[in-house]
Image (spheres, helix red, strand yellow):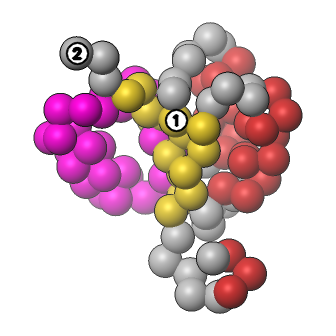
Amino acid sequence: MNTVKILLVEDHMVVRNGIKLLLESQGEFTVIGEASDGAEALSILANGLAPDIVLTDINMEHMDGMELLKIISQKYPLVKVVILSMLNQIHYV
């Protein structure tokens, strides 16, 4: 069975570890890479990691999820991006 390969981008390690455990407990997902911000995620992608999905927080230092989405859409159009947010502002929904 093929699993969905995920690059997980989250600046809080405890949250990142929790999301990773949840995803991998489902059996359908494999976290193949982790980054603490968008810039680190882009570096990982540039080094050849090929996820099916980048699962990213929206609010991070150095490069947020929205900027990461723009760059991935341009440079890696086959990679899907899912953005997680706890923000309740309509601009981000």
Rendering coords of residue 28 (x, y %) = 25, 32
- Amino acid type shown at disc 2: Met
- Label for residue 53? 1
Residue 21 position in % (x across, y down)? 21, 45
Q: Position of residue 6 (x, y in %)?
A: 44, 33
Whether residue 91 can be seen here: yes
Q: Quadrant of residue 20?
A: top left
Residue depicted at x 25% and y 54% = 18
Which image quadrant: the C terminus? bottom right
Disc assigned to residue 1: 2
Query: Is 27 drawn above or below residue 49 in the view shown?
Result: below
**Please, what is the three-letter code of the amino acid marked with disc 1?**
Ile
Tell which residue pokes out farthest to the front in this image.
1
For marks 1 and 2, give the CA distance: 17 Å
**Category of crowding for the residue at label 1, using alpha-carbon neighbours closer than 10 angstroms: few (below 14), some (14–19), many (at least 20):** some
Residue 63 covered by magenta stretch: no
The first of marks 1 and 2 along the sequence is 2
Residue stretch rendered in magenta on the structure: 8-33
Q: Is residue 36 visible?
A: no
